[in-house]
Image (cartoon, helix red, strand yellow):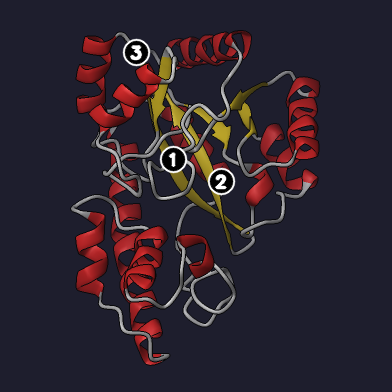
Amino acid sequence: MHVHTQYSDGTFTPREAVSLARERGLDTLAITDHDTIDGLPEAFVAGAELGIQIVPGVEFSTVHGGEGLHMLAYYLDMEDAAFLAELARLREDRLSRAERMVQKLQALGYPITFERVREIAGGGTVVRPHVAQALVGAGVVPTVKDAFSDRFIGSGSPAYVQKHALDPIEAMRLIHAASGVCVLAHPGTWREADPVPIEVVQELIGSGLDGIEARHPEHTPEMEARFESIANGAGLFWTGSSDCHGTLYEPVRMGMRTTPPEQFEMLKRRAAELRVAVRRP
């Protein structure tokens, strides 16, 4: 329910991601690239050929309290003009943000270029991990994860640049207006490692949040149990997701976490309700 491709910061093409899902015994795959739905057409074709159900999605950038907070949007109307306009604005901001990060890193003496970052992105949405990959390629850090420290491009670091995005509640309104289902992404990894405060989760629930990504490779067992309990107590569904970025992180995560069928059925029912509510065909 959470996979990235080369259209954002994954290393697989959509077809390669779908093929791997089949190899690993999965029957459903959500393509959720950052702020773009450009990989979905290829995924739909591959899914039809390989017998994998493709859930259309996107990982949507928002900001709360000065920090990024991501929303997974599923089954949205891919032709909704307002939503597409916001995705375009977010992609443009990501490009500008990455360029400013590179400028800061250069001023600190690190030998990377924005041209190299764009090459790594390969025409997809430019995101922070592409800057991290450039740092790895230049020999500045040994791994992508090391680049996200307080020395380089982690939150509050010397080369960090704040993103500009909607407040999560505004984003949920936009997603719902496009008949999309809103799921809080990896709430255990807010501000790089700290979980989203419970009061923030409750505020989002009160404002219309549909579900919570409770199971995630970077959540502890205690976090997973806590977020499942919060979702159950609020009458929401919860998901389990690998947040697979291909070979960007080791091991390849696809299938490390999955969503139970009964939770997925709740998600689909919510999507059907939203389509009726906004009179989508």
Residue found 26% across the figure and 12% down from its top: 50
In front: 121, or 19? 19
Where disc 3 sits, the SS reads loop
Where disc 1 sits, the SS reads strand
Q: How many labels does the image show?
A: 3
Q: Are marks 2 and 1 in contact (CB under 8 Å)?
A: no
Residue 198 visible in the snapshot = yes
Residue found 63% across the figure and 44% down from its top: 218
**Label 1 sits on what residue type?**
Glu
Q: Residues within 10 Å of mark 1 (few under 14, many from 20)?
A: many
**Nearest to viewer (mark 1 / mark 3):** 3
Q: Mark 3 points at which residue?
A: 52
Indicate which disc residue 168 carries: 2
In front: 163, or 258? 258
In the rendered image, the vertical position of residue 43 relative to residue 48, given as above or below: below
Left or right? Give the position of 137 relative to 275: left
**Label 2 sits on what residue type?**
Pro
In front: 263, or 164? 263
Q: Mark 1 points at which residue?
A: 59
Residue 232 rendering spot, x and y as whole percentages: 76, 20
The earlier-in-sequence mark between 3 and 2 is: 3
- Asked where in the image residue 126 lies, by quadrant, the reply is bottom left
